[in-house]
Amino acid sequence: MTLVTILAAAVDLEAAGPVQTIARQFGVDWWKFISQVISFSIVVFVLQKYAYRPILEVLEQRRRKIEEGLANAERIKVQLAEARQQSEDVITQANVAATKLIEEARSAAKSLQERESQRAIAEAEGIIAKARAATQAEHQKMLGDLKREVGRLVIDTTSKVTGKVLTGADQKRLAEAATRELAA
C-alpha cells in the first residue's frame, strides 16, 4: 500500500467508531504505525538495493564458477583418459621397438659369433697347417741329420772293422747304401 492510502485509511478509521475503539484498546497509534511502516519500507528498499541484490549476484557468480569447475573437471577427465591412452600407445610402441632392437642385437651377435668362430677355425687350421709344415720340415731335417750320422757311424765302424782307411768313393758308396737301408 502506498503512504497516501494508509493515511486515508487512518483518517477513515478515526471516523469509524468500532475500529477506533479496538485500536485504542490494543494501543495502536496511527501516526507511529505509519512512521514505522515508512521506516520499514526504507529499510527494505536499502537492503534490497545494497544487500540482497549483491548477495544474489555473488551467489550467481559462485554457481557459475561451480558449473565451470564441473565442466573443467569433466574436460580434465577426458584429457586424462586421452593422455593415458597415448601413454599406453607410446609404451606399446617402445616395447615393440625394444623387442625389435633386442632381436636385431641377438641376430647381430649370432652372426658376429659365427664369423668369429669361422675366423678362429681358419686361424686354428692355419696354425695347424704351419705346425704340420714345421713338423714335416723338422722331421726331414732330423732324417737328414740321422742319415748323415748313420752314414758317418757306418763309415767309422767299417773303417775300424776292416782296419783300412776308406777313400772318398768308398765313403760315398757306404753312405748311399746306409741311406737306402734307412729309407726302406
Image (cartoon, rainbow, N blue to C red):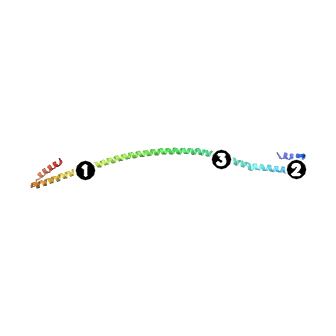
Question: In the depicted view, which residue is nearer to us: 49 or 130?
Answer: 130
Q: CA distance from mark 3 to mark 2?
A: 56 Å
How packed mark 1 is, by other alpha carbons closer than 10 Å (few <14, some 14-19, many 20 or more), is few
Crowd class of label 3 (few under 14; some 14 to 19; many from 20; radius 10 Å): few
- Marks 3 and 2: CB-CB under 8 Å? no
Mark 3 residue type = Ile
Q: Nearer the viewer, mark 1 or mark 2?
A: 2
Q: Which mark is residue 24?
A: none
Q: Which of the two labelled residues, at mark 3 and mark 1, occupies the earlier sequence position?
A: 3
Q: Measure how far apart labels 1 and 2 are at the Cα level.
A: 153 Å
SS class, disc 1: helix
In the rendered image, the quadrant that contains the N terminus is top right
Contact between labelled residues 1 and 3, with CB atoms less than 8 Å apart:
no
Inspect the image, locate mark 2, and give the three-letter code of the amino acid beneath it.
Answer: Gln
Q: Position of residue 119 (x, y in %)?
A: 34, 47
Label 2: element kind: helix
* Residue, disc 2: 25
Q: Which residue is mark 1?
A: 135
Position of residue 111 in the picture relative to residue 88 (left or right)? left
